[in-house]
Amino acid sequence: MPIKTVLTAEIENVSILDAEGRFDEKLGKGLIPDADLVKLYGHMCTCRHLDEVAFKLQRSGRMGTYPQNMGQEAASLGAAYALNNDDWLVTCYRENCGLFWRGVPMESILLHWMGDERGNAMPRQHHATPIAVPIGTQMLHATGLAWAAKYRGEKRIACTFFGDGATSEGDFHEAMNFAANLDIPVVFCCQNNGWAISVPGHIQCSAPTVAQRALAYGMDTIQCDGNDLFAVVHCFRKAIKQARSTGRPFFIEAVTYRLGDHTTADDARRYRDQAEVDAWRARDPILRLRKYMAKRGLWSDAKEQELQAKVEVEVAATVERAEGITSPNRVDFFDHMYAEIPADLALQRDTMQTHGIGQDPSQIEGAVIELPAKEGH
């Protein structure tokens, strides 16, 4: 029998605004109105300053471990800008910019890393899930949310983010397989920052692109410059339109870089060359956008100073709200766990003790206990 080709594939790479501020008019014209661009730039600067302050909070013992977002602001912001407000935004932990654009209060993220569970109570109207620290679990959640929307006959889609290291997790492949085989409208976005903590990308994935992993599932895919806000918006609009109209998933690989350590518990100097970091610092998504806006006459040094002063006040107020929040009620742990709390847990809640309860709870000092009557009595 003759040999025949069963698959030929191409993956596009999209770049519209380069590191020097050069702009592709053909692809980018009309993509983001000037007024929106100024707002988006200001929003990125706010998130960057929060990152810097959060680092100081951790170092001064006022907050736990924190993963800085700096360098990766464009990908989640471009997605949040392109999505409908009722589409699900399912993130890991480097998508602050997109969450805040959605309207999630900035103090929610600080509270999360301060160990306060109230930081995970995302306001329902923002259709955002709590940030996910376990690697890869959120991709399954996004698939389930989009599946539920499809079941209900809604046109809502889900968009989820993860790193390049997460594509080696079983959860990634399970989510991709479900979404592709059951026609579930999910936009999967891999923020490929080149490092899975200290493991470089070429060890994580031997293929030339992470994007081609989507081909194995029969899924359309595209790669973009993840530090180029215009390219991100272009790719997400394409993916969102296709997912919404066809009910099929779409995969985006956003090539980016984390300028800081993996978290404040990490020291990237032990495994990354400074020359590599410096090269990527020149490709900073905020820096290139500022250059472009200045060339267009949309920005100036005076506007930059005014913005920075505003940002400092806003972030300081955020920290004040987070640190000044009233202490949680200790019974919330019990009351928010069940719609109807079981008697044994109600006992623990009311006495705030567990020792001796199984033997004779009436012996607990100060407790008012009503034991349920036994059958036949």
Image: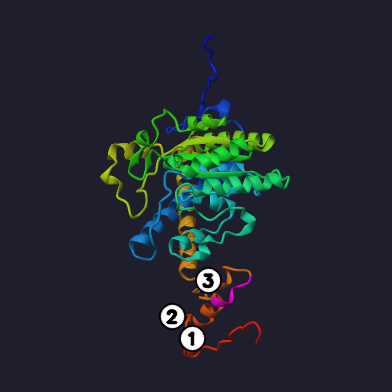
* Residue drawn at (61%, 36%) of the image: 181
> Label 3's element?
helix
- Check if mark 2's residue and mark 1's residue have beta carbons within 8 Å: no
- The answer to whether residue 49 is above or below residue 234 is below
* Residue drawn at (41%, 29%) of the image: 207
* Residue 249 visible in this rendered orientation of the protein: no
Which label sits in the foreground, 3 or 2? 2
- Mark 1, residue position: 360
Q: Which residues are magenta?
A: 340-344
Q: In the picture, which quadrant includes the C terminus?
A: bottom right
Of residues 115 and 306, the one drawn nearer to the viewer in this rendering:
115
Is 183 magenta? The answer is: no
Q: Give the farthest residue toward the left.
A: 270
Residue 144 in the image, given as x and y percentages of width and height: 60, 47
**Mark nearer the N terminus (3 vs 2):** 3
- Mark 3, residue position: 333
Of residues 291 and 263, the one drawn nearer to the viewer in this rendering:
263
